Image (cartoon, grey):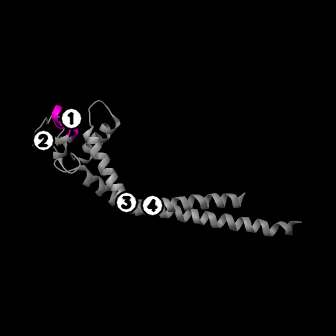
Amino acid sequence: MLKLYAMFLTLIFLVELVAAIVGFVFRHEIKNSFKSNYERALKYYNSTGDYRSEAVDKIQSTLHCCGVTDYRDWKDTNYYSEAGFPKSCCKVEDCSPQRDANKVNNEGCFIKVMTIIESEMGVVAGISFGVACFQLIGIFLAYCLSRAITNNQYEIV
């Protein structure tokens, strides 16, 4: 059973290792995918409670940003032609900016999100490294205990 446990722990370790390598190799594709999905979410934005629209509102209100690259991204959307900027773009609370660019945040959200993700990568890498070390220690100790049990089995009799 200990060998089986060590094998499963090794398998989990290898899957985590492959996921980390794939994430590092394809990080630029991940950025591009995020940017295109965010642009699509802006294009189909509505205020009826769609989960993409809620995500856009949450990002814009939390990070105090507007649009993908800047607030002008909203001008190409159907929502802007009907209602103007969304309230999540406002610089201050309780504003209804309509089409007044002075009342909305100027900076785009894509750069802010990428900055936050890249600044937190060190923490994620450190935690992942710590978990990997504990897994390797667990694998090593499981094999050692399994060998000790196997070697001492005949001495008991």
What is the CA distance from the residue labelled 1 to the residue labelled 4?
Answer: 37 Å
Mark 2 or mark 4: which comes first in sequence? Answer: 4
Q: Position of residue 31 (x, y in %)?
A: 33, 55
Span colored in magenta: 77-88
- Pair 2/4: label in front: 4
Mark 2 or mark 1: which comes first in sequence? Answer: 1
Element marked by disc 2: helix
- The three-letter code of the residue at mark 2 reads Lys
Residue where numbered disc 2 is placed? 103
What is the CA distance from the residue labelled 2 to the residue labelled 4?
Answer: 42 Å
Q: Position of residue 54 (x, y in %)?
A: 31, 37
Mark 2 or mark 3: which comes first in sequence? Answer: 3
Element marked by disc 4: helix
Q: Is disc 1 surrounded by few (<14), some (14 to 19) or many (20+) residues within 10 Å? A: some
* Quarter location, residue 53: top left
- The three-letter code of the residue at mark 3 reads Arg
